[in-house]
Amino acid sequence: MKTILLAGTILISLAASAAGRDIVVAQSSDLRSNNPGVNRDGNTDGVILHIVEGLVGYANNGEVKPLLSASIDMAADGLSYTFKLREGVKFHNGKPLTAEDVVWNWNRYMDPKTKWTCVKDFDGSGAVHVTGIKAIDAATVTMTLEEPSAVFLGLMSRPECGYTGIISPDSVAGDGMFDKPIGTGPFKWDEWKKGEYIQLTKFDDYVSPANDGKPDGMVGSKRPLVDGIKFMVIPDASTVKAGLQSGVLDTAEISPDLIPELKESKTTQVIVSRNNGKNLFYIQTRDPILSKPAIRRAMAQALDLDQLVEAASNGTGEANGSMVSSDSVYFSQTQKKRLAFDLEAAKKELDAAGYKGEPISIIANKRGNVPSFPAAVMAQAMLQQIGMNIQIEVLDYATQVDRRRSGKYQIISQSVAPRLDPALMYSFYVGDKDQNASLMWDNPKAIELMKVVYAEIDPKNRQAIFDQFHELMLQDMPGIFLYDMIDVWGATKTLKGQPVWQSNARLWEVSLDN
């Protein structure tokens, strides 16, 4: 109750002092840290996105492109990358970006004392081993790898890594303690009133990377079109709704069930944006019943996926039975394949597998911004049509996550955050369950394909592997992928532009009418 009252008081004070110069956006929780890639969560990543930039970043289609670098030259053997820095880039304190700054940042990230979330991705214990970094001249950096890697650049671009953002050494105080992020992004750090708001201000000297005048993921046109951004900490959905309707908030994530109401309003609009995250049913392939692929295939054939997605997404989603996002450069004709909706074929698969009506439980949660529960309810009704005894177990989200990580489930209705390279998405599901019980699929062929695609650099060869992977998945059906995640945001009608990307607020190239 105190949190709701505080949020309401903040909205009243904002209404009294609104000057129309900042975008005011609500987020459900406070920053964990302003240190890029350290002690982070999704809301933290969304704030940091506006402040820092890495050498590379993701485009809308999942390709990794230059960001602070003007060009990337990979050696023929795949063991070294040379980054030529863009000219004229400045930190928020006015100092120019140099190659030595990049080297300092990398060494700082890899120092265990920094506690960077992604250090194990690059130190040889994970997918990549970076063996060296060197400033060739003031504007050129070379990084060397122990082995070729198709995901090296993609890993550096990840939100979880703080985008491997390059910050000024002045971000660290004289005593070695982190002070504040002095980045190169379109907005700069201003003020943090913990539990209430984070204030960023426009960086007047910001220059976008080369672009066609349009926003494109992290790498397109990135002009700051407002004087600042105020991220308000408002966990209560009803307060967010009131703030949008009153115009005190300019934009915020909303529950899909508010779509009709906000669409009908004369003062608000609804913004729907697809991202690379996935909504799916995890299936425990080591369960005594569900260990049979025929039963898992029967489940997939019994689901009218288009109808299920239409209902679960409030009409915002589009069925996609692939692990690869519909927006990905790797979403091919093969990736569009899925088992056809066929109740008779499903019944035959069940009979052949010897299913005798044993109870099967779907775990779901009732968070308003994900389709976990409605998707489970729809699936229950559809699977009952082929004689399956389906029950739903509703858990709080934290408990659901614990059950998935421990492998103690039959089916889980789950949403998984965006991972823009398909290989990185695969790694969240595929691997040895004896070593990591949270993994969904431990077919040796799938594990081998994942390992191969991590090292394969040629895009055509990668496409062939991804397609082979999808065909194998349709046979084994270790889980049922429903549709790509949908970001649903409300906004005032004065807001122009696209304020959300990959589940994060993205407020460059966004403006407010007076």
Image (cartoon, helix red, strand yellow):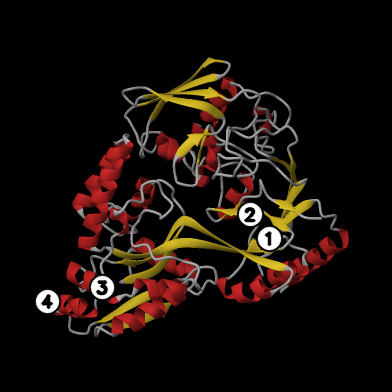
Q: Are marks 1 and 4 in contact (CB under 8 Å)?
A: no
Disc 1/disc 4 C-alpha distance (Å): 53 Å
Residue at 70% across / 43% down in the picture? Answer: 224
Identify residue type, mark 4: Ala
Q: Which residue is label 2 attached to?
A: 499
Please tell me which of labels 4 and 3 falls first in the chain: 3
Residue 104 placement, left or right of 269: left
Disc 2/disc 1 C-alpha distance (Å): 8 Å
Please tell me which of labels 2 and 4 falls first in the chain: 4
On residue 467, the disc is: none
Residue at 67% across / 75% down in the picture? Answer: 264
Q: Secondary structure at mark 1?
A: strand
On residue 301, the disc is: 3
As drawn, the residue found furthest toward the right would be 16
Q: Secondary structure at mark 2?
A: loop
Is 88 situated above or below 490? above
Q: Is residue 434 visible?
A: no
Disc 4/disc 3 C-alpha distance (Å): 15 Å
Q: Which residue is label 4 attached to?
A: 352
Is 169 situated above or below 477? above
Q: Which image quarter holds the N terminus?
A: bottom right
Q: Which residue is label 1 attached to?
A: 251
Please tell me which of labels 2 and 3 falls first in the chain: 3
Residue 81 location, quadrant: top left
Identify residue type, mark 2: Pro
Please tell me which of labels 1 and 3 falls first in the chain: 1
Identify residue type, mark 3: Gln
Q: Are marks 2 and 1 in contact (CB under 8 Å)?
A: yes
Is 214 situated above or below 300? above
Across and down, in percent, residue 325 comes to 40, 54
Across and down, in percent, residue 461 comes to 27, 39
